[in-house]
Each structure stands twice: as C-alpha cells, then as structure tokens.
Image (cartoon, coloured by chain):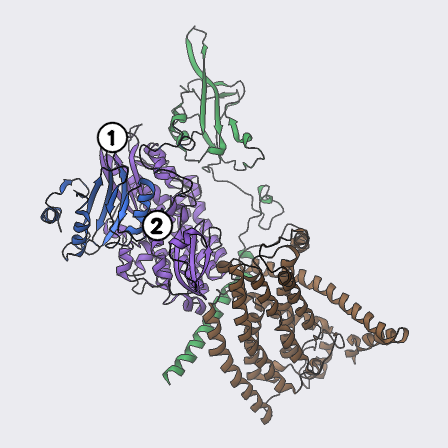
Amino acid sequence: MPFNIYDFTSFTQWIDKSLYDSLSPLWAMIWEMTIIGVAFLLFYAVIGLFLVYAERKVCAFMQCRIGPNRVGPYGIIQTIADLFKLLMKELIPIKNADKFLFNLAPFIVIITTFLAIAAIPFAKGLHAIDFNIGIFYILAVSSMSVIGVLLAGWSSNNKYSLIGAMRSGAQIVSYELSVGLSLITIIVLAGSMQLSTIVEAQADGWFIFKGHIPAIIAFIIYLIAATAETNRGPFDLAEAESELTAGYHTEYSGIKFAFFYLAEFINMFIVASIAATVFWGGWMPFHIGGWEAFNNIMDYIPPFIWFFGKTFFIIFIIMWFKWTFPRLRIDQLLTLEWKYLLPINLFNVLLMAFIVLMGWHF
Amino acid sequence: MNSIINYFTGLYKGVKSLVIGMKVTGYYFFHPSEIVTQQYPENRIGKNTRTRKKLEMFERCKGEVIMPHNEKNENRCTGCGICEMNCPNGTIEVISKFITTEEGKKKKVLDKHIYHLGMCTFCGLCVKTCPSKALAFSTHFEHAVFNRAKLNKVLNHEGSTLMKGAE
Amino acid sequence: MTEENKNSGLDKEEEYIINIGPQHPSTHGVLRLVVSLKGEIVKSVEPHCGYIHRGIEKMCEKLTYPQIIHLTDRLDYLSAHINNEAVCLCVEKALEIEVPERVKYIRAILSELTRIQSHELWWCSFGMDMGATTCYFYGLRDREKVLDIFEETCGGRMIVSYNTPGGLMNDIHPNFQKRVKEFLKHFRKKLPEYDQLLTGNVIMQERTKNIGIISREDAISYGVTGPSGRGSGFSCDVRKHHPYGIYDKVDFVEPLYKTGDTFSRYKVRMDEMWESMKIIEQLIDNIPEGDYCAKMKPVIKLPEGEYYQRVEAARGELGVYINSRGDKYPYRLKLRSPNLSNLSALNVLASGFKIADLIAIGGSLDYVIPDIDR
Amino acid sequence: MENSQLKERILSLVPEAEIVETKQYLNAIIPKEKLHFLAKSLREAEDTSFDYLFCLTGLDLMDSLEVIYHIESTKYHHCIVLKTSTTDRENPILDSVTDIWHTADYHEREVFDFFGIKFNNHPDMRKLFLDETRIEGFPFRKDYVDEINIVER
C-alpha cells in the first residue's frame, strides 16, 4: 500500500528509540523536547513569514494592487526585511506601565500558540504529542491567549489598550462557546477526541461529507467563531485600527510587537489547521468510500501537501473575510454569538446526535 | 411566529449580502488584469513594470515654473516685475539692471529671475499675467532635495539675452 | 486631569475620558475629540479645533482677488474647484459682469466632477472607518480617473486653481469631453459595485441604521447642510434654492431622506454621485463655443459694499462674504465653511452611542479639517 | 415675504432699526440691546420663521466691532441680514443668539477668538481655534500687530 511511503510513525519512533537506547531516560526526554522545540521554532519562523507575505499579497490582489514587489522577485524577501526591521527597533519603555506584566504579556500570547500547535498532526505520525483528549486540550490552551491580551491592555497604562483588551475578553469568552460546540458536533460523529483517531476515521470520506448538513453548518459556525477567536477582521475589535489606533498592542514596539503580530498569524494557522483536521480530514487524502483505484491515486499525493493545502485554503477564506467586510460593533458581535451562532449550534449538536443515532451519516 | 420568520429572513438576507460582497473582492482577486498600480520609478522608462506603461505627464501639469530659452540662449523676459507683483507668496524675485544700449540709451533688462520653488503654491498667476509670455510650467515634478537652498532657482540661464521682438 | 477638562465639566468620577486625535487614524486630519465614555458608550464629545488654523481670512485681506483664489483651494481641498468658483462668483456679482455661457458650462461640469471625486474619497474613508479597508482602494482607483481629467485640463490634481474672476485660467483641453465621457461610462459600471461591497452589507447596515440621529429641526438649527443635512430631510441644496451658474437650467433631483441617521447620510451621498453624473451628461455635449474668460481689467477693484455668495460645496453650503472698501484688496473676507457647522452637531449626534458609532458618525459627516480651521 | 414687508416688520418690532437695502439682501442695523429680541421674534413668528442662520461674521470697522447675521427661512427661502455693533473695543459684549440658533455656538466662539467680542448667555465662551497661552490679542482686528508672523509687503 503506497500509504506507507508517507508514514512518519516509523521515522519518529526510530528517533525516539535511538535516543532512549543511547541516553538515560531523563536526558533522552530533554533531547527530544529540544529537537521538537527547535523544529517548531523553525516552523514558526517559516510559517509566520509565509503567512505575512501571503496576507499582503492576497489583500493586494483583492484591492487591485500588486503588493510587496521591491525586495526580491515578487517581493518574497519583503517579510524577512520586515523581520529584521522589527528586531532592530527600539523597545520603548512606557512610563507608569506595569513593567513585569507589560513584558510578560507577549510571551503568554506566543506560548499559548506553542502549546496549541503541539497537538496538531501534520502527517501520519508527525505530531509532537497525541492526546486522547486532543481537541479538548487545544480548546483549553488556545483560549489562554486572551490572558496575554488582557494583561497587555491592562499593563500598558493606555486607555485605548484597556478598551481593546476588555473587548477582546468579552469576545473570546463568547466565541469560545461556539468553537467548542461546533467541534463537539464532529466529536459526536467521530466518537473520539483524539486527533489521530479523528483523522483515521476520515479515511473513507471527510467528516464534512460524511456528516453532511450538520457538519456543514458546524463548519461555517466554526469558521466564523475561529475568525473571532483569532481577533481578525471583521472581528478585530480588540485592535480596531480606526477606533482604538491599535487596541491592546498600541504601546508595544520592536520584537514585543512582533510577538503579537506573529501570534496572530500562528493562531490563524492553528485554527485553520484544526478546521482542516476535524472537518476536512487533516492529512488524509481525498477518499471516496469504495473507489479503490481513485483512492490509491490520491494516496500518492503526500499527506503534508493535503494538510497544508487544506489549511491554506481555509486561511485564504479567513483572509477573504477580513478584506471584504466592515468591522462589527461590540454589541453586534455579542448579538451574533448569543442570538444566532449559539442557538443554531445547540440545535446542530442535537441534529448531529440524532443523525448519528439513526445512522443517517455516510 | 412573525418574529421567527423575521429571524430567519434576516439571517438569510444577511448571509446573502455577505456573499455578494465577497463576490466583488473575489472577482478582483481572480482578475489580476484589473490591477491599477503603477510602479514608480520603473514606469518612467516603461520597463520592469507589470503594465509596461510609460509614465507620461499631462502637458498642462504644473510641475514647476521655468523660463524657456531658445538655442541662442535668449529668453523673453523683459524684467518688468509683473510676475513678482502677482505672486501671492513672494515666490518670485525679479532683479533687473540698467545697461546702456548701442544707441547710448539706458535700458532696464533682467539680471536675475529668482524663483523659490519651496514657497510656490502653483496658482499659475505668474504664467498667466506675464505680458511677454516669458514664463511657462514644466511637467518636471521630482523636486525632492536634501537642502532647502537648492529649491531657490535662477530661471534665466547664465549670460542669456532678451529675444528680439519679445517686448 | 487637566485644567481644561475641569472647565468643560468632564471631570465626573465615573467618566472615562479619551482623546481621539489630534493624531488618530479616523479623524481625517488634525482634529481632537475629547470623548467622555461610560464603558463603550459615549457620554459627550467635545471637538477641539485649530490645529491647522492658518488665518486664511486674515491673509486674504492682504491679497488681490485673483490671488485669493489659490488660497481657497486649501480650505476644503476635496472640493477645491467649488471653493474657487464661490469666490469668483462673488467677485463677478460685485463687478456685475456676466461670464460667457461656455464658462458656466465648464464650471458646472468641473464642479460636479469635483463633487463626485469628493464623495468617492468620502466613500473610501467611510469604509475605512467602518473597518472595510478594501473600499479605500476601490474608491481611490476611480477617483484617480477624475483627477486625471483635472490634471489634463487644469494642471493640478487636487489643488486646481482653475477659476479666475471672470472665467477660467485657460480653455479646456481638447481631450476633455472625451475623457469625461469615458469616466462616466467607467463609473456607471463601478458605482453599483460600491453598493454590493458596502451598502448592502448587513454589518454596515446594522452599524449605521438608527445610529447618530439628528432631526430636521436640529439639523437646521445647527446649520448642518449638504448631504448631512439632506439626510435629515433638510432641503438645503443651494443649487436648487438659490441657483447660480447654469444650475437653473439643468435637471436634477435633490436626494432627501427623512430619518437623519448615519445610513441616510450615506445614501444621500451615494445618490448625489448618480445625480452629478446626470448633470454632467446633460452638459458635456452642449458646451457652447465662445471665450473662456470675460474681459477683465488687469487690476480688479470691487465697488464699495458687501457681497455674499452661497454655493453648494461637496460637504454643504459654502458662503463667501466680501466687504469691500473700493480697494483691490477686500476689507474683510469671511468664509462660511460647511464643516464647522456640521461638526458642531457632533455632540448631539454621537451622545449615547458607542465609540464605534462615533467613528462612523464622524465618517458620515465627512469633515475636512482644513475647512473647519481655515 | 417680500423685502418691503420684512422691512415693515422689522421697523414695527424695533423702531430704531436702520434699514439699508442692497442689491442682494435687506440689511437691518439693530442696536445691540434689541438684537436678541428681534432675532427671537423673527425666528418664532409664523410668517417670517427665520430658522436657519447660515453665516455669522465678525467685522472690525476700526471705530466699532460689528457682527453680521445672515439668516434665512427654510420655509419661504427669504433672507435678511442683521447687523449689530459695539463701540467698546476694550471689553465688547453682545448678546448671544445660541438659544435661537444652535449653530451660533461655534460661530460666536470663532468671533470671540478673532475679534474678542464676548457674548452674553453663551453656554461655553472659550476660544475655538487659537491657543490662549500662545496668542495674545485678537488677530483679526485691524490694529493687531504681530511682527514675527505678519510680513508686510
């Protein structure tokens, strides 16, 4: 079966085994963690740079512009140049700010993204950790980033920042519900919270096709709520450039600002990859139950291409939202959640449970 | 019941309006031919740009005030000072001198026509009111310099004389 | 808390005061709004102006009438041509000279083009205030075409200085009519796109409907004119009620909305763009032959007396008051700027709504700060 | 209402008013004590209903300081011009019309800013444009001297 060409399980297990054979368990664990940490840091840098570039190009093309085009061919080195600019910028100390919290906030935001990305399977066997409560874990840690945002707003000693942070708090508390419930809909279908199991369960068809109507509704709700969770337009109330100048990160400069900026893009990547994993089969190729020949051809396409293809498609949709819609007002934001998304979502969970009970799913 | 209908029609209309909006941006995303960006300064030579369009200024573009000279280094300025009088900002200074002509008459001619580009508001009154049509606008528009003194220009060329018949 | 805030009664304990401006992305210039908040809700707004006060009225007292024209460009720089026209009309009225028909036609066409480009820029920045950044680029893309027409004929893009007492600086460019027609054809296609992108959008509608309401009586009392006044049902179009130039001969509708909220102000401007296109279409093919400037004396001296001219600028009624002592300089020149009066209603409009609404209301009033400060 | 009728109306309300007819508007020069009364009467009377103050101008006539009110009725579209003046240059005080037309608020502040005319009963008589700490005097008065910023040519 060609499937095994791209099976990383043996590869990762070999590293694991060789480390444990040659070193004491403690040192082996430390080495493993270091390798994974370095790998993720490199991945962060690459994905961050790529997403910033992609966002700028996507928005430019939507706005009849060219976008970055000066540094390197088609401006591909532009984001690297920007990175160096941010690294070299002065870290402006703020008068009367709570220094400790002010400096802590960007790290909290970036560390929560680190925690969340650990559970995501990039290909078969290629994930840092495979919990049996994977989705639950991701939901728990990704909502912690709001603490960083709140701290940033509170400690900056700036009124705009404080308003931005409070908005962000209200927003994430509400939209966390929708994200959770829309994922629960799929958990009902999959019967497991372990991400690897969820992906394996989609081998004969992705959940968005298997669960048909309720899965599609859940996907749309997840997309909206995830956009809100990452504080991106049209839900960028916490930043709200035209109202609060830059919201919670008004006072940040240099690398600390870069952390917030990077965290926004990594968060977007994480939510998109969760959507890809849960609804679109993650690294699982496009399979149709019973069509063996077709499935075999699809298997030749490497799983990480499937994974990143799906993720970037969802990221493109989120960007498309941002560059089309006006920003919501805070009360509209809450109305949307409590009046539309939550009731529909609750009904949707019931519907899914009913469909699963009756066996109407594929 | 009515409110339930309103709830769902509102939902439907809202989603529809959002999709219509996304169609517009989506159209432009997939039609790069609609891009209107002109790449300056590459477009000055018409190379290395997307559209290959050469930057051409309109002939009436008010770039800066110049004094046209012909190939014999002659201009049409008589040094009358009407442009100086008409300038609202004191942009123009006309310095004239008296020379003795061949017939032995004393005559007022232009010595220096000083133009402070940094103060000019491009109202066009000097060009319009000049009785001998000595001034004109050029389409040159790149005035950025590092020193403000460089914006003070002398419009008449070195050693230029009055064109015959310009009076 | 500063001394200043204490005087203005903004020092109550439960209030949270933020300064929006002088440098802020959505004040469209250097305007400072002292906003007192309770949570997200705006309790009161107090505009502080004067950050770019240049004393244009005082400067005019030392300038001759043709020289004044170029300063009026710098009032409301988005309706520069209309401001020029206002002063020219006032001078022509004082001198009792009749400008050639051709001049009237060209002035009207250019005024309407100015109105279109001004409203286009308003639409961009309104979208930007609402958070829809893409609007900005679509609006600017189409505005660029109008600016090209201006540049070809007048020589300037924004700061046109094309009018002069008695007529125009020079005749229209031979390409003028062709280009205007091209633009109209292009813009008739693009304007519905604006509606699809922003007007119909449910978020935008929810954010603007029933927000920032000013009644007709209040609008009149506060002197809110132009599209902002017409959004409240205040029929204040000077072109209709006190026609000048060629406007008594063209057929157009003054869009009026009753509600007086942000959305109706928005709609008035969108409708005005259509109406302006209608006016241009009526005039563009019928520009009569003739001189582009009436015969004027080299030095213009106005007879002693007071003269007042009202025109409809893109943002409302622009008035020019000239008090002449028979000199070549005006004794006093007052410019009644539409934006100052519109701004004075901001507190009434925004109190009780949210910060986001304040920004949207500010966007719908469409103030241009140099016109407020002068 | 025709100009002649308006003239009669003004004279019946304020007999000491001086009416000057120009080509454009009917000008009524009113003593400063009567201005507020006249403005209020013209605003409130049904057949005049001057509800729209479209311009408020300050003017320095060297011997006196004048304020000019251009008012219009949005119902009948007739306009008149009211003028009032004070000879006191040290501490000029006039009556505010803010309670009649709200727009007068900012315009009167502007006049105070540039001419130093104070208005009685104005809700918020502060300078609108100029910075009190930096600019002394009233720049639009004809006798204002500023040797640094005003260059005489």
Residue B52 makes an appearance in the image: yes
Rendering coords of residue C162 (x, y %): 38, 39
The residue depicted at 89 percent of the width and 76 percent of the height is: A21
Q: In the rendered view of the protein, which quadrant contains the N terminus of chain B? A: bottom left
Label 2 to label 1, Cα distance in Å?
Answer: 30 Å
Q: Position of residue B166 (x, y in %)?
A: 42, 20
Name the residue that disc number 1 marks.
Answer: C326
Count neighbours of disc 2 (C-alpha within 10 A) and say few if under 14, some if 14 to 19, many if 20 or more.
many
Answer left or right for B62 relative to D36.
right
- Image quadrant assignment for residue A120: bottom right
Residue C340: which disc? 2
Q: Position of residue C2 (x, y in %)?
A: 45, 52
Q: Which chain is purple?
A: C
Residue type, mark 2 in image: Leu
The C terminus of chain B, quarter of image: top left
Mark 2 secondary-structure assignment: helix
For label 1, the crowd category at 10 Å Cα-Cα, with few meaning under 14, some 14 to 19 and many 20 or more, is some
Q: Chain of mark 1?
A: C
